[in-house]
Image (cartoon, rainbow, N blue to C red):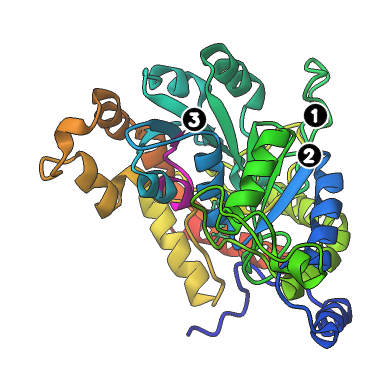
């Protein structure tokens, strides 16, 4: 393991998380119970939605979201090519086909509504929009498109807890948070996310039917939880649907509640650091900082800069690596991963069952591919200092001068 002087992300835990976890350990009830319920209620209030349901992780949240909006075998799900692979993998796990759509532009790497429209087919059952780096996708256009075609809209909001839409010309969206803008939304509490419990996830929705279904499928489709049986409220159960074990637990819920209380302050700190990054990268000729002029309140999950070309990216990553500053790439184009290429390639066993639209979609992703060649994810975490940001930026500006 490399000894990074500056990691890509870092957790911000203190005695409050320790006390919370200890309180639950000493209480003796560890599986889904009152602590999880309290976390869900506080989370729903924060996002401004009726329901929040805690689940095992963000991928489980996406799996359940796809299932509950009715995606089934041989359906298509239009989704961004520039995303973590979870939504695409869960689409395939259901037996459906991911249809990848390109991003808007290098300075706006969220799914392009026009590219979604081009990829709709009679088999499209859902659209996934991901709020890249904490910046909202074009939800007004995407919502309108989904409504017009009767298609479900799933938010992959794993980067975006605390992000808010600012758009006075759209009163129905203005002020609303990520997680309240689609039919159902998914969050992750993985260790590098703005709110972490180590592993964990949450589903939010306004819709009673979706919340009820998610709660049922989270625990094997069983009509009662062990907590209810423990309390004497029930002694048996029926199984109403074929579900999963995607339950959350009390230790993580207690940590999550503390982290949620700190979130706004942490996100404010991220916003300040992003401003410092932006100011300093103005001197880096030919570099693009995505979402620079966006009015929305971002969650600033990632700090990403796009190099003038692939060669400059390579040199800059090397220079940062030499300074023991960690970088990453969010994300390679999903359609170019071996497992996804195989689905539509000549070798695909069941290629006859793949629709023309899936093949087309995977071939026409030039902006996502260009983004993957040139984007660098830079360190960003609430305990980072302005001096550290300055150090990263001077390496970037210096690498460019050398070239
Ligand atoms: C983290 C993440 C996921 C997956 O969440 P896990 O909790 O790791 O399963 C999915 N989508 C995006 C955009 C993410 O960042």
Name which residue lies at 48% across and 68% down. 319
* For residue 34, side relative to residue 344 (left or right): right
Q: In the rendered structure, are the residues bearing label 3 and label 2 in contact, judged by CB atoms less than 8 Å apart?
A: no
Alpha carbon distance from label 3 to label 2: 26 Å
User: Is residue 286 visible in this depiction of the protein?
Assistant: no
Q: Residue reaching furthest bottom?
A: 26
Alpha carbon distance from label 1 to label 2: 7 Å
Question: How far from the left and from the top, in percent, is residue 65?
Answer: 56, 43
Q: In the rendered structure, are the residues bearing label 3 and label 1 in contact, judged by CB atoms less than 8 Å apart?
A: no
Task: Return the mark for residue 166.
Answer: 1
Location of residue 107 (image quadrant): top right
Magenta stretch: give its range. 79-88
Task: Return the mark for residue 126.
Answer: 3
Q: Is residue 152 magenta?
A: no
SS of the residue under disc 1: loop
Mark 2 highlights which residue? 297
Q: Earlier in the sequence, mark 3 or mark 2?
A: 3
Query: Is ligand 1 within 8 Å of the beta carbon of the residue shown at mark 2?
Result: no
Location of residue 56 (image quadrant): bottom right
Question: How far from the left and from the top, in percent, is residue 76?
Answer: 38, 31
Question: How far from the left and from the top, in percent, is residue 256?
Answer: 78, 65
Question: How far from the left and from the top, in percent, is residue 164?
Answer: 78, 37
Q: Quadrant of ligand 1?
A: bottom right
Alpha carbon distance from label 3 to label 1: 25 Å
Q: Earlier in the sequence, mark 3 or mark 1?
A: 3
Name which residue lies at 80% across and 29% down. 166
- Foreground: disc 3 or disc 1: 3
């Amino acid at each position: 393991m490399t000894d990074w002087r500056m990691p890509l992300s870092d957790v911000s835990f203190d005695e409050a998380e320790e006390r919370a976890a200890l309180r639950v350990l000493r209480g003796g009830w560890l599986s889904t119970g009152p602590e999880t319920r309290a976390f869900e209620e506080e989370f729903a209030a924060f996002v401004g939605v009726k329901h929040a349901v805690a689940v095992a992780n963000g991928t489980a949240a996406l799996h359940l979201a796809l299932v509950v909006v009715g995606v089934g075998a041989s359906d298509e799900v239009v989704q961004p090519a520039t995303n973590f692979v979870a939504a695409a993998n869960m689409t395939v796990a259901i037996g459906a086909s991911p249809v990848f759509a390109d991003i808007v532009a290098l300075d706006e790497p969220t799914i392009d509504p026009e590219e979604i429209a081009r990829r709709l087919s009679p088999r499209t059952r859902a659209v996934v929009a991901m709020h890249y780096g904490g910046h909202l996708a074009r939800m007004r256009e995407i919502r309108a498109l989904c409504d017009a075609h009767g298609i479900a809209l799933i938010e992959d909001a794993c980067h975006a807890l605390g992000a808010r839409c600012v758009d006075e010309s759209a009163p129905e969206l203005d002020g609303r948070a990520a997680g309240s803008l689609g039919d159902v939304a998914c969050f992750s509490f993985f260790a590098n996310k703005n709110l972490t419990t180590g592993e964990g996830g949450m589903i939010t929705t306004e819709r009673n039917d979706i919340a009820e279904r998610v709660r049922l499928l989270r625990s094997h489709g069983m009509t009662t939880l062990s907590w209810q049986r423990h309390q004497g409220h029930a002694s048996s159960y029926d199984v109403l649907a074929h579900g999963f074990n995607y339950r959350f637990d009390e230790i993580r819920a207690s940590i999550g509640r503390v982290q949620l209380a700190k979130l706004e302050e942490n996100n404010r700190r991220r916003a300040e650091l992003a401003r410092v990054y932006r100011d300093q990268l103005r001197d880096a000729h030919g570099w693009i900082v995505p979402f620079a002029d966006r009015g929305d309140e971002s969650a600033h999950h990632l700090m990403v800069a796009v190099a003038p070309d692939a060669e400059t990216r390579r040199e800059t990553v090397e220079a940062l690596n030499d300074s023991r500053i960690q970088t990453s790439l969010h994300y390679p184009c999903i359609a170019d991963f071996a497992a996804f290429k195989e689905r539509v390639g000549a070798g695909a066993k069941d290629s006859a069952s793949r629709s023309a639209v899936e093949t087309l979609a995977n071939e026409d992703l030039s902006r996502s591919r260009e983004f993957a060649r040139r984007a660098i994810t830079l360190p960003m975490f609430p305990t980072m200092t302005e001096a550290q940001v300055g150090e990263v930026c001077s390496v970037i500006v210096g690498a460019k001068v050398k070239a």
